[in-house]
Image (cartoon, rainbow, N blue to C red):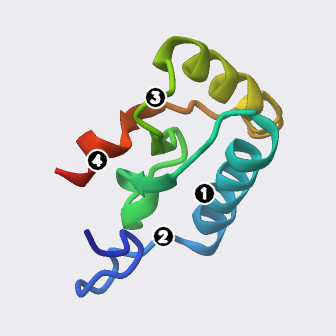
Amino acid sequence: MGDMLDSEHPGDRPTEADSALIAEADRLLRRTSGVPVVAILPFGSRAEGRARPDSHVDPVVVVPDAADPHPAIRALYRALRPLRQQENLAIDLLIRSKSSADR
């Protein structure tokens, strides 16, 4: 699994503003959610440099296999609340266990 921000196709890289949003989402998820995060993998239009002004952020959050996804989802969305409100931004999280992400 390669770095989702390293693309061989010109124009398939996030803008500076989108990179900043992705980095802030990563920071909030790792530091304030209380969920043990294994990895955060950005994907979708913002990660690929083709976002429109109304595009949302789509991180895949990889959690340990033992983590219960239901409380984790609530905690992860709660951690992103400041970013969603400040930027008036829609965020769609996908939660995957480490074993399912490794496949």
In the depicted structure, whether residue 68 falls above or below residue 39: above
For badge 3, the amino acid type reads Ala
Q: Is residue 55 left or right of residue 72?
A: left
Dot 1 or dot 3: first in sequence order is: 1
Residue beneath the point at 50% across and 39% down: 56
**Circle 3/circle 4 CB separation < 8 Å:** no
Dot 3 or dot 4: first in sequence order is: 3
For badge 4, the amino acid type reads Ala
Indicate the position of residue 18 as horizontal and vertical percent values: 59, 62
Indicate the position of residue 92 as horizontal and vertical percent values: 47, 30
Callout 4 secondary element: helix
Residue pointed to by mark 2: 14
**Circle 1/circle 3 CB separation < 8 Å:** no
Give me the disc on residue 66: 3
Dot 2 or dot 1: first in sequence order is: 2
Q: Residue furthest left?
A: 103
